[in-house]
Image (cartoon, coloured by chain):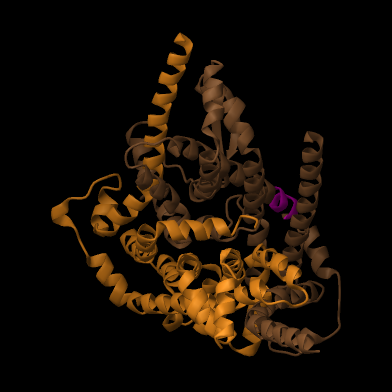
Chain colours: A brown, B orange
Amino acid sequence: MTTNTLSNREARLAFWMLAPTFFIVFLIVIFPMIWNVWLSFKPVGLADLRGASLWRFNLTLDNFLKVFQDPEFVTVFLTTIFYAVGGSLLSIFLGLIAALLVNREFPARNVVRGLFISPYIAPVVAVTFTWGFILDPQLGVINWAGMEHGLWSSPIPFLSQRWFEVSLFGVAFKLPLALTSVILFDGWRYFPFAFLFILARLQAVPEELYQASAVDGAGPIGRFYHITLPQLGTVLANLFLFRFIWTFNKFDDIFLLTSGQSGTKVLTIKVYDYAFGEFNIGASSAVAMVLFVSLAVFLIFYFRWIVRETQSLL
Amino acid sequence: MNRERLENLIVDFLRIAGLVFFIVAVAFPFYWMLVSSFKSLEELLMQPGNLWIDLKHISFNAYIEVLFDHGFSRYILNSAYVSLATVILSVALATVGGYAVTRLHFRGQRFMSAGILLIYMFPAIVLVIPLYVIFAKMGLRDSIHVLILVYLAQTLPVALYMLRSYFLTLPAEMEYAGLIDGCSRFGVIWRIILPLSAPALASVALYTFMIAWNEFLFAFMFLDTPENFTLSRGVIQLAQSVHLSKQLVMAASVMVTVPIMVLFLVFERFLVQGLTAGATKG
């Protein structure tokens, strides 16, 4: 009986110790999440916030119809996927290169390592406005340098032009300019995340493996292919998962760089546009639902695939 | 043998070239931000491609203008207040919560630990509209304290998760001694756990500070009155109101970047631990 009351007391204490955290997370994360579902099935505009209609039981599918019938929707959805895949792959690729460069001991290595992490630490407003300034058609240093050295003749609006005609080896094609710029920015800003994890993994590869393969006559390129890369498989797969989810959900970077103009409109920008451009909270919540469900579907497929892959390896 | 020497030579060359490329690409925007903030508008307009700055012509006007004409002296205080309050509350609540999850026994313990990280993956943009609606309806939206609450919700799950992992490595026996000597659970946390957890607490504090200090979306959506602006919110306001005067925007960007960078330089090890902890499975 004493143990029972003691464990009861312990459970009650634990409850009170966790209660503030629970309360805050419930209020700011779980409740809005559920309420978002409710809002997405209701005709709500920003003007309705004052009235009592928020609680009325007038559910409708209009918001979803509006979202799916929006002529932009397919483009926006495909742009989101392109942006998320492109941004994730680029940042992981750059992170891999950076980690390989820093893996071996050299003077001031720690300084370089610290420098490489800084884009990830710096406030997003500061780095987006700086890049916006650097890429500016009139005042930007890149356009000035490009024109001064005869690389191009008129200023290129990197962040405000949808298509850019390129001809490479006689083949002309159209490059989505603003979207590419935004993806390059994401590569710059988020490679440190991949860099940190890949570097940690590289440092953990046993030295004997390299020595053994050196004895076998493998050069540096062969060693990378046969030893380093296989060791990195899991890290790279996990990094892609994290970066894809985060880039898919990313709003800040595109909003601050292009406001979603010039072919960079992604689903998160659409959430904002419906709410504060059209004052349609219902449609905005519906896009948020689309975002959420797409991500859930991706996760299901990803884990199915990962599980099958690992099983086939065993 | 010859082939290996050639390969090594090429790899060494590529390594140096790669390092130079990365260093320039990473450092240049920061350099440009700083250099431009010390230039005058005329210099920026007349010589947009001047990579250097004439040390005799360094101008602090942009900083003075931003600080006193555009209200940034106020925004700095607001940002410091929001970030420090978030750090103190987050560390306190995560310590108590993390202790409960590791040392006390209750039903749903496993579920708790797993659920913590799941919440971390929730996209902010999905939450911002319903929260906007809720707080607008309550008349609390344009408030710095609501912002602190939002930042707490964003940082607590990771903070709790990090401290939980650390507490698991501490031997419980020492606490029994404290408990037998008549300490309460809170006494044990204060006298035994906290002094032993300094490195983990530093990681949590820095990580939380970074999230709160850098946050843009909620500050942008929630704050309307300039008296309430954080630095990030202020930089956006400034960028929207001045079109040509990039030196002002750059000076403001330097002001919001320098504090977090200084913290990073001094406490790099702890911050890196904080950054990686959020994404590793325990």
Q: Is residue A32 above or below residue A208?
A: below
Q: Is residue A81 above or below residue A49?
A: above
Q: Can residue A177 be seen from the camera position used here?
A: no
x, y percentage for residue A151?
40, 31
Instruction: Let me know if residue B131 is in the magenta part.
Output: no
Spot occupied by residue B54 in the image (x, y as percentages of width and height):
17, 50
Between residue B33 and residue B157, name the one nearer to us.
Answer: B157
The relative height of residue A108 versus residue A259 in the rendered view (above or below) is above
Q: Percent x, y for residue A173?
A: 60, 31
Q: Please state which of residues A25 and A224 is positioned toward the viewer in this rendering.
A: A224
If the image is split into quadrants, where does the N terminus of chain A sit? bottom right
Locate the C terminus of chain A and report the quarter of the image it occupies.
Answer: top right
Residue B116 can be seen in this image: yes
Magenta stretch, main secondary structure, is helix
Q: Determine whether, in the image, residue B57 is placed left or right of residue A74.
A: left
Looking at this rendering, what residue extends furthest in the left direction? B56
Looking at the rendering, which quadrant does residue A236 occupy?
A: top right
Front position in the image: A224 or B168 = B168
Q: Residue at x 32, y 38 (%)?
A: A107
- At a point 49% along the width and 35% down the height, the residue shown is A100
**Residue under the point 58% across and 55% down:** A261
Image position, residue B273 (x, y; %): 50, 57
Where does the magenta region start and end?
A73-78
Left or right of B159 in this view: B84:
left
Count of labels shown?
0
Classify B43 as above or below B241.
above
